[in-house]
Image: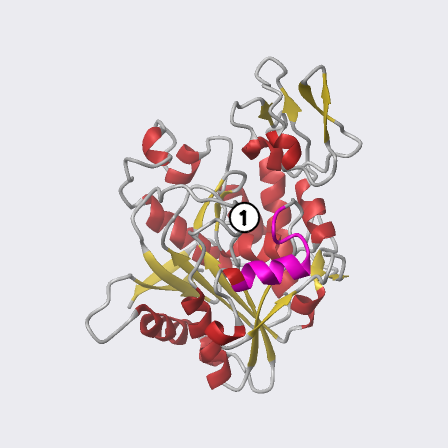
Amino acid sequence: MSSKVYFTDMRCKIGVNLQDKLAMLIKKAGIDTIDFDGKFAAIKIHFGEPGNLAFLRPNFAKTVADAVKQRGGNPFLTDCNTLYPGRRKNALEHIDAAYENGFSPFSTGCNVIIADGLKGTDDVAIPTEGNEYCPAPKIGRAIADADVFISLAHFKGHEATGFGGALKNIGMGCGSRAGKMEMHCGGKPEINPDACRGCHQCAKQCANNGIEFIGGKAHINNDNCVGCGRCIGACNFDAIYNPNDSTNDELNCKMAEYAKAAVNGRPAIYINIVNQVSPCCDCHAENDAAIIPDVGMFASLDPVALDNACADACNAMPIISNSRLGEKPHTHGDHFTDSYPETNWRSCLEHAEKIGLGVQAYELITL
């Protein structure tokens, strides 16, 4: 069995814009099979950490919100607070960040609601049959309360999961702060003292006092560390590493289980915009150059098939030479693993299929 994935490129003839093409895409993908009449529709999106410019433009969100309203629904844009420090760690700062990046009710036609509340503690444990790691994922309450779920994701690289697409947007993004801790705690990093420069950049990125300094060198305080791995990306000298080879795979599996809990029992549609494919997540307060040219827009009623189709499409694209990927040896046969050899994005799709969230096989329909 395979699922249908719909695709349109980023080319536009005179008189037709990308928003027109997106509206056509989601109609073909099956948005009209969903009853929106009088329903609350959560549009899960990443608002982008201020300083990052690779996140999706608000125009895409407006197109989706308008489509919901045209069908009688009540849309809202939503995300959950972050586990790490930054400008999206509580609802007030998170909304300010969203507005700063252009996601206001005036630009998108709908309100912004931070799903897990002021401090990231407003969640609902959702028992989910078939889950192996997280039997009752902790989902932000506003998302759990919605009648319809829509994922609108920027498809890009990711330093822990290989790439971030629909499943990461849903799974990691819909987890409350406690949920994110549950997903990240498969293992804890270690520090090579010979490589540590004592610059304190890792400690600045730790929200849990998990790093202390002894003799000018960083050390992991295992009592406080939650295993989120943010310090790994913060170190410019590769002094911090993950000694547990299964950690990223376990994170991917937990993320798939959170995604299943977030959408289980509700009508849903999934959209991936594959442009500005930066090597790291939009959670960073910066973005590196894109690793491949823009691909296009994809939509499906199956998030697993959708992410698989997007990964295949990205891997078929040429590498941009002056990018992180262009500077790496190309030995793994796919762009995301070549960017981060310690990642294994396939483990997320495999586990998502195993627990019944969708199938990896797809039929690509080009519009």
Q: Residue lying at the far top in this picture: please name it.
A: 194
Residue at position x 36%, y 48% in the image: 312
At label 1, which amino acid type do we have? Cys
Residue 93 is inside the magenta segment: yes
Q: Secondary structure at mark 1?
A: loop
Left or right, 36 with respect to 307, comes to right
Residue 149 is inside the magenta segment: no
Q: Which residue is mark 1?
A: 283
93 relative to 286, above or below: below
Residue 330 in sight in this render: no
Frontmost residue, 353 versus 109: 109
Residue at position x 35%, y 44% in the image: 290
Q: Residue lying at the far left in this picture: please name it.
A: 14
In which quadrant of the rendered image does the N terminus lie?
A: bottom left
Residue at position x 52%, y 61% in the image: 100
Q: Quadrant of residue 335?
A: top left
Graded by Cα atoms within 10 Å as few (under 14), some (14 to 19) or many (20 or more), the crowding at tag 1 reads many
Frontmost residue, 131 versus 324: 324
Q: Which residues are magenta?
A: 86-99
What secondary structure is the magenta-colored segment mainly? helix
Q: Position of residue 357 (x, y in %)?
A: 57, 58
Q: Residue lying at the far right in this picture: please name it.
A: 223
What colour scheme does the image use?
secondary structure
22 relative to 206, above or below: below
Frontmost residue, 255 versus 94: 94
Q: Position of residue 138 (x, y in %)?
A: 72, 57
Residue 154 in sight in this render: yes
Left or right, 236 with respect to 10, comes to right
